[in-house]
Amino acid sequence: MPQLLLEIFSEEIPARMQQGAARDLERMVSDRLKAAGLTWDALTTYAGPRRLTLVIDGLPAATPDREEEVKGPKASAPEQALEGFLRKTGLTRDQLTERDGVLYAVLSSKGRATTDLVAETVDQVIRAFPWPKSMRWGSGTLRWVRPIKRILCLFDGKVVLFDIDGIQSDALTEGHRFLGSGQLLKVSDFVDYRTQLEREFVLLDVADRKLRILEQAKAACAARGLVLVDDDGLLDEVAGLAEWPTPILGDMDPQFLALPPEVVRLSMKVHQKYFAVRDPSKEGLAPNFLVVANVEATDGGKALAAGNSRVLSARLNDARFFWDEDQKVGFDAWNEKLKGVTFHAKLGTLAQRLERIVAKTSDVAPAIEGDAGAARQAAQLSKADLLSGMVSEFPELQGVMGGYYARLAGYSDAVSDAVRDHYKPQGPNDTVPTAPVTVAVALADKLDILCGFFAIDEKPTGSKDPFALRRAALGVIRLIIENELRLSLRQQIEGGLQLYRNQGVTVEANAAHDLLAFFADRLTVLLRDQGQRHDLVAAVFALGDDDLVRIVRRVEALAAFLATDDGANLLAGYKRASNILRAEEKKGPVPTGMGQTGLPNQPEAETTLAFAVNAARTAVETALETEDFAAAMTALAALRAPVDAFFEAVMVNSDVPEERDNRLKLLGQVRDVMGQVADFGQIAG
């Protein structure tokens, strides 16, 4: 079947926008062609520095003919309703069919040529393309990320003719800006298109560009006994900067290695897009860098390497200036300047935020058996580097530079490490600190952020989370769980909110409740990602427990229990008991208390269940006191057989009031005993 090939050729597309643009192109074209009734075998998109490309294999030459039946008004409907339906369908009254007193219109439409649909689709997609930033050029009305130069569009080897704002479609493309022949390339299909581009020094697929970069970069390093410092983010970026990427290894002045390695790497990455290099036989970085050029130099890249080395030296000289000047200023001066920096209009200055973090650290440290004095000292230093010259230049180094400056100022390793790492974990894949002093400051920092924005009702909504509160909550949860900290989350939240009240901030009435619910939601997401069912988390959270470590252990034990036959059957019995009790509660008060034994004509199954419930209650309470949740589940498992036998042999709604009351009490006891472990009513199944 025919193939569609589309290329939108423009001036340079920013690297950070390319892959998103490829996805948008695929989505927008797919949606429009599917809506028109087209299907295909395969669709692929490509993005690079100067082109977006789409290829669809297996498109039919035209859309299929369509016949659609549209339901209309009743035959007895007023004349106005009939006239409206006729206008809508474009038919006359005698063209309608009547069935069961209702009028129907059968609308038929001939299929359309795919080339016509493609021309319309490309026009619509280009005009509605959702670039994060776009521009208009010349006297036209078209907007694109950069000026469009040409549009290649072929279907079944022939040009799909259309004109968009003066840009006429054709079968032509261009090769590499510098290495190519400079001639326009006429192509016939995708294979020819890709082959000609590679001959003209253009790698169409970003995966091919990344592979070329890595292979040649590692080879260049290995030739000098060095290894590349991996950086996936930088690799993604440079693969979008060059159509024919060519790695070149350069040298830098060794004196700059006296700077912290994070400073050197960030100077390379942020300003110059260079990879760092290291000597595997030594600690730290090597006095080299690797730049990815967009050309193949005749001298092997020597001139390019030398020029880039001079530029890097200028950048690193700036960094060295900040490094030297910051050491002359120090923490006291930086902390004093925090008084003049607003954290948030409703939450005060950074100095006030620091005051709260110090207070919260003092509250948290004893609970995690940390050195309260060292934790308080680290908290007092934690935000100072935000006012340093280095962090002003490289915001990514907040905390990192504070750790270096604290160590140079003579503070202990524990304090310096806490200043460095208190922002961790900053994402689901980031490492979690384990040092008690660091954990105390990290918890205080994140709890303060969360309490503050919930206090002023600035909660995340939908996909919007401008203050990264979801990340902060996940950080708190991971710090607590992975360090097995036994904290009352509710107390920590209420204490954090009180610190804001002490500073005159008006706290929303439901802030504590909403924030606790937010933590429950984040914990559910975390455990679901680890394979746990969300309904089990809800069932445990419903008990009102706020010890995250205990909650997770209870969820794990509950999941293991429900995976057994005893667990699944007991859950069914619980739901049956709950349904009966709910039905009776609608009629009036349901009797409560202990079910009795030894009643006249009492069935053996009823007596057995009464003894089993009492035994289970004792066993469950004992197990829960020692947090032996596996034992609690084992105790519940002992109820499975008595509950099954009870429902098989006993009629709950007996005509004898005393029998009915006793049996309802027994079912209430079953529900209550199981409810000590989890709210089984929230569990699906």
Image (cartoon, helix red, strand yellow):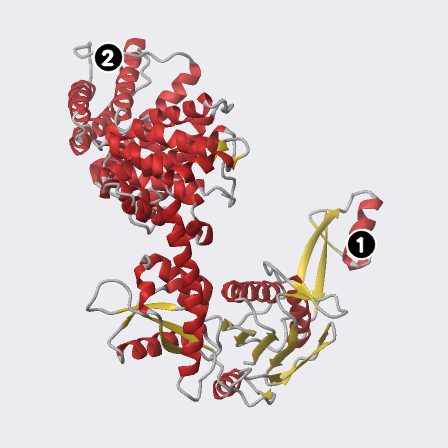
* Label 1 CA crowd tier, 10 Å (few <14, some 14–19, many 20+): some
Is residue 268 left or right of 144 when viewed as pictured? left
Where residue 479 sits, quadrant-wise, is top left
Spatial CA span between label 1 and label 2:
72 Å
Give the residue at x 44% y 40%: 469
Residue 112 position (above or below residue 430): below
Residue 678, x across and y down, in percent: 29, 29
Residue 312 position (above or below residue 212): above
Give the residue at x 49% y 85%: 191
Q: Nearer the viewer, residue 29 or 418?
A: 418
The amino acid marked with disc number 2 is Met
Give the residue at x 44% y 64%: 315
* Label 2 CA crowd tier, 10 Å (few <14, some 14–19, many 20+): some
Mark 2: secondary structure: loop
Kindly identify which numbered label has been placed on residue 309: none
Residue behind mark 1: 86
Residue behind mark 2: 594
Is residue 54 left or right of 518 when viewed as pictured? right
The amino acid marked with disc number 1 is Leu
Q: Of the two numbered discs 1 and 2 on the same chain, state the one appearing first in sequence.
A: 1
Quadrant that contains the C terminus: top left
Give the residue at x 71% y 68%: 137
Residue 196, x across and y down, in percent: 51, 87
Q: Nearer the viewer, residue 578 or 360?
A: 360
